[in-house]
Amino acid sequence: MPTESPAISLLSVISLISFFIVLLTNKFSNKIRSGALLDQDFDKPQAFHEEPVARCGGLAGLISLSFFYILYYLLFDKILFAYLTLSFAFFLLGFLEDLKFKISPNYRLLFMIAGLLFFITFFSIKIGTVDLNFLDIWMTNNIFSIFFVLLCFLFIVNGANLIDGFNGLLTIHLLIINSILLFMSLENIDQSLTMVIAAQVVILLPILLFNFPKAKMFLGDGGSYLFGALVALNIIETNNSNPQISSFFFCILLFYLFFEVFFSFFRKLVLKKSPLKPDKLHLHMLIYGFLKKSQKFKDCNYLNSLIINSVYVALILPAVFFNDNGLICRYWFFSLLIIYLIFYYLFYSFEKN
């Protein structure tokens, strides 16, 4: 009789553990710091819920990941030190905000940059190739390489935090990206990357059950920073371990997280607003406004998440079949940016009219 592999057994155990941790965290989160985790601010720009919801998804995610790191070490005698460090550092940075310790956006960004610079240099995080000759040449310069990796993390982490406002929007988005990365890492010789991505998938699934379609918990800043940072490292490591796959394919996977931040930054500068202050003019918010004004749907919150992620899958899925063709992936990526701008113009025009 065939025996189950240790990897499958570990993931099965983690899936069960994470479900009960999510259950317990959601039940008792209102007792932490006198209910500080309950999101009851319905007036902030990124609030689209009508009842208090606990921002405890990140806490449940970190506890589940901690069990995974410990059990992985006990089974395979290997410490996933880079992932462990990144998980705790980024979770704590965001969780302070969830606990209502007010840290200004400027200081938060400075802490994030300082932490990332330490992480990138200490663990020698590099991107092997980016499929652009001039950038590949510049990447041989250590200072430029650190700066480029830093920007990648900043865009992805802040992109994750930016779209975490609707039921299931970020959680489903992360599950899609990680599932594709998991599929692509199955043939890797070093299975630690495959395992850590698979662990994130099985941990995010029970969180999704409490986040969609009706939100009983949010990932919160702790969760969006945590899983945003992890998906950034997943992308870099998968890119480096699969040189046959075009780097632009990974850009395609991240185009929504990346361009939401990139476009928002320059949009606010043009409007003479602070790029660090939130507003209600992001694409996912404009689509929600469109659905709301149409008055055809009872609950536009979860529907908004479904539509955005469905369109996202439809736009990136063709690239999966030619992920090793750098030229096609390059043009596909820039085409997606144009498609984003078209969608934004249409929904922005509707909002203003």
Image (cartoon, grey):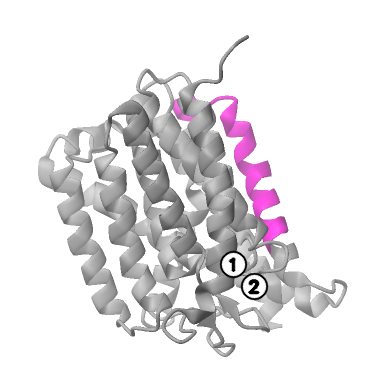
Q: Quadrant of the N terminus?
A: top right
- Is the magenta region chiefly helix, strand or loop? helix
Q: Residue furthest front?
A: 1
Quadrant location of residue 302?
A: bottom right
Quadrant location of residue 305?
A: bottom right
Tell me whether circle 2 and circle 1 mark residues in contact (CB < 8 Å): yes
> Is residue 21 rendered to the left or right of residue 301?
left
Q: Residue at x 48, y 60 (%)?
A: 60
Q: Where is mark 1, residue-wise?
A: 283
Residue 122 in picture, x, y percent from top left? 14, 46
Q: Decide whether residue 310 is among the magenta residues.
A: yes
Residue 286, labelled with which disc?
2
Q: Residue at x 41, y 83 (%)?
A: 33
Which contiguous range is marked in magenta?
305-328
Residue 23 in picture, x, y percent from top left? 60, 61
Q: Residue at x 61, y 67 (%)?
A: 284
Q: Amino acid at mark 2?
A: Leu
Q: Amino acid at mark 1?
A: Leu
The Cα atoms of the two marked residues, 2 and 1, are separated by 5 Å
